[in-house]
Amino acid sequence: MSQQSTTFPLEFELTPSETARSSAERETILSDPGFGKHFTDHMVTIDWTVEAGWQNARVTPYGPLLLDPASSVLHYGQEIFEGMKAYRHADGSIWTFRPEKNAERLQSSARRLALPELPVADFIESIKQMIAVDGAWVPNAPETSLYLRPFMIANESFLGVRAAHKVGYYVIASPAGAYFTDGVAPVSIWLSTEYSRAGRGGTGAAKCGGNYAASLLPQREAYDNGCAQVLFLDGETGTHIDELGGMNVFFVHGTDTLVTPRLTGTILEGVTRDSIIQLARDRGMTVEERDVTVDEWRDGVASGRITEVFACGTAAVVTPIAQLKGVGFEIGSADAPAGEITMALRQELTDIQYGRLPDRHGWLMRLDAAAETEVTA
Ligand SMILES: *Cc1c(COP(=O)(O)O)cnc(C)c1O
């Protein structure tokens, strides 16, 4: 299904919104954006058909999609997405973090869901286009960002079960407040023993809406048990730790070793996960990617060998885990403080993202200046 664009790279046509919010309205929203509640004035759309490939790249006013009720995404769930952030640096410039990783992951998710692959250059240009038109929506308070949500859906009107011949790719953007408003608070997480999020050969390594649909019931079980998130075991043996509903998991052993479940095809390969592994190695820590069992967690906490546990992902960056709860057991205590190494890694990663530390791995890409000259309308 790999397909070049008709014109490569794509050229985007801009239709400016006539109902864009005033700067006063925007500043009101940006002063308390929350997460995923408010959207910017524009969106990106790129169409794909099996005959013509990627075409009609455009930036238009943000608004509802017109979907035929027979659109295949509504029936068979052929949908994938990405999540990334635009960060404002102290000098006002706007940057994003390792966008080629998101572009490549969207391509691998597309392969698994039998959707067409969007070329990396077009993906990155779509992000730049959003910032060129809605860059004023990137907030500047500490730890805030503009969350970018690229996604792709099958929008062919056809009820037969096969890969769609008509697809849409979109980007929407939503200002995001600081994830932790009163300092980083460790969370309790719930071990789901009844449900898994992925099975061998399934879609666990793809970032698709279907995985999230399947996680909502166990996520509710987590809430009902006073936990913030749900932890899933591998679907095959029910013994190894996979990940949370939307975040990868790490264990600190002693002061010098970081352990995280290895990628077996059922775990989503997080960009944050990969970056944390690099930062830990840079500090001289040993990083082990291997199977981790709940028994190892229990014994490690009891013996003092496991000193810290945390989860990571783009939205919350790094979240300390105080406790694991499950039916009839608890590991760790709910009031455990955030770990030192956890917080140091979190600080270092966000310092790089916000331009407060040198970008020694070349992880940042500037989004504003470069895109402005390329708007075609
Ligand atoms: C997106 C996601 C993550 C985190 O990935 P990042 O690239 O670090 O944001 C982890 N697990 C799941 C299931 C995800 O969908």
Image: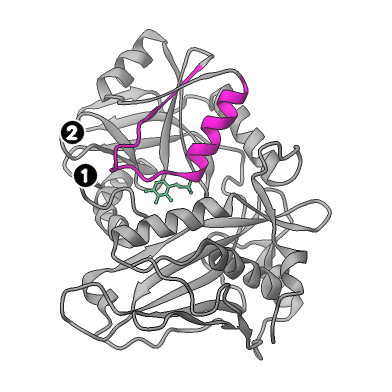
Q: Dot 1 surroundings within 10 Å: few (below 14), some, or many (20 or more)?
A: many
Indicate yes or no whether the magenta region holds residue 279. yes
Q: Is residue 151 left or right of residue 128?
A: left
Way the structure is coloured: one colour
Mark 1 lies on residue: 196
Amino acid type, mark 1: Ser
Q: In which quarter of the image is residue 297?
A: top left
Q: Where is residue 330 in the image (x, y as percent from the top left)?
A: 29, 25
Nearer to me, 304 or 5: 5
Residue shown at the point (75%, 38%) measured from the top left: 358
Position of 251 compared to 351: left or right?
Answer: left
Q: Can residue 191 be seen in this view?
A: yes
Q: Which of 3 and 234 is in front in this view?
A: 3
Position of residue 126 in the picture relative to residue 207 (left or right): right
Residue annotated with mark 2: 238
Q: Which of 137 and 27 is in front in this view?
A: 137
Point out the image quarter for the N terminus.
bottom left
At a point 62% along the width and 28% down the height, the residue shown is: 344
Location of residue 362 with respect to 328 vertically, above or below: below
Looking at the rendering, the stretch of residues picked out in magenta corresponds to 257-283
